[in-house]
Image (spheres, rainbow, N blue to C red):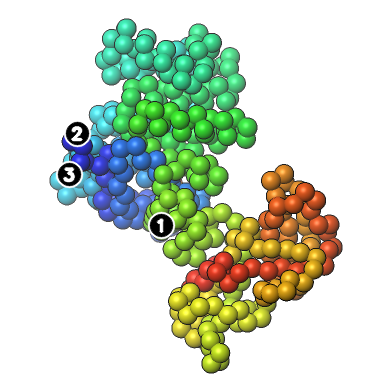
Amino acid sequence: MTAAQPQLDIEVLAKSFHRNKGRDVRAVDNVSLRMEKGDFVVLLGPSGCGKTTLLRCVAGLESPDSGRISLGGETVYDSALGLEIPPERRNIGMVFQSYALWPHMTVAANIGYPLKMAGAGRAETDARVKRMLDMMRISELANQYPGQISGGQQQRVALARALARGDDMILFDEPLSNVDAKVREHLRLELLAMQRELGFAALYVTHDQEEAMSLATRIAVVADGVIHQIGTPQEVYRTPRNLKVAKFIGSANQLDGTVVNDGTGPAVETPLGRIALKEAALPSAVGSRVSLISRPERWRISMDRPHAAAAWPGKVRASAFLGPYNQYLVDLGETELQIWQQGSHPLPIGSEVWCQISADDLTAFVSDSAA
Ligand SMILES: Nc1ncnc2c1ncn2[C@@H]1O[C@H](COP(=O)(O)OP(=O)(O)OP(=O)(O)O)[C@@H](O)[C@H]1O
Ligand SMILES: [Mg+2]
């Protein structure tokens, strides 16, 4: 592999499945994705959007309909050439949601197995297994069998096994979703540290937004087999490209309305009244339907009416203390807002409050009728 080659290059890849008595499902719909060495790309998207299918195509476990895939500069799939390299020759590590450890092998033997299959010698295998056991902090479990250790420990073993061969590309399909929240958070940080140290490129599937945000160098938001946006966690969170991405990433308040301009400047007519927005902030012309999206942490809530900014009266319907911030559901007539705000004592349910937000924190998107 030459330094200039991407670690993974997927070009207009497509894969459909035939449904019994139904229409074909375009699980992967002309997806292109390029990853450099050390990249950590997280595929984030709703159930059934094609994440697993994409991973399986890269691994060679699924045969795509068309497109091209290369790994480290070597073409492993090309529909035009009729080329398809089998999975065992793609040098990819993989971790799945179910740990899939071999029950009759010890922890050490499980981790060493891929090395053995790749023809590594005994001494090399032992040294590598020892290193993985150390890195995953499970040295004391080396001689146990999978049935004798906890779920979190089994997942550590599965991770160690996937990384043991030192492949440049590792695929992860929801590897942490079966372990409890505390262990998950811990493993996430360790995985990140290992990735930075070992330098592999990771293509990682999760449903968990926090996991995606914390691990990814880039997040790819997938829906209906299509990558809607790919960018740093900050980019997809702060500047989502469309309504689908905005609503899928993080928590979002949505206010639907119509673009108006009565001569005093552009605005959106919403159930909360007319909200003035800059011309440049509006995605479409007067008369069109738009959705204003706002993040719960950008709203401010107070008992007293704020002097300056536009503010709306509301009533607290739900209130919870979460430690770092308080979480509220506030009713503003028919409109419901989710608001997160720091404070040691949350306002009680039933409080009559004022809610405010800067117009800069409202992002307007063309409404999607299905939304
Ligand atoms: N072997 C198959 N035969 C027919 N349809 C399939 C097959 N595998 C997947 N599909 C369909 O392809 C689509 C994508 O499935 P996929 O498993 O890739 O989704 P996913 O994003 O991984 O979902 P989840 O988050 O639930 O794991 C779904 O509509 C699914 O029903
Ligand atoms: Mg899946």
> Which SS class for mark 3?
loop
Up/down of 352 relative to 86, above or below: below
Residue marked by disc 1: 229
Contact between marks 2 and 1 (CB within 8 A): the answer is: no
Residue at image location 82% in from the left, 67% down from the top: 352
Residues packed near mark 3 inside 10 Å, few (<14), some (14 to 19) or many (20 plus): few
The residue identified by callout 3 is 82
Q: Which quadrant, please, contains the N terminus?
A: top left
Separation of marks 2 and 3 at Cα, in angstroms: 22 Å
Q: Which labelled disc corresponds to residue 129?
A: none
Q: Is residue 150 left or right of residue 93?
A: right
Secondary element under disc 2, as helix, strand or loop, is loop
Q: Residues within 10 Å of mark 1 (few under 14, many from 20)?
A: some
User: Is residue 115 shown left or right of residue 155?
Assistant: left
| Precedes in sequence: disc 2 or disc 1 | 2
Q: Residue 362: x, y in percent?
A: 56, 69
- Nearer to us in this view, 76 or 297: 297
The relative height of residue 179 versus residue 291 in the rendered view (above or below) is above
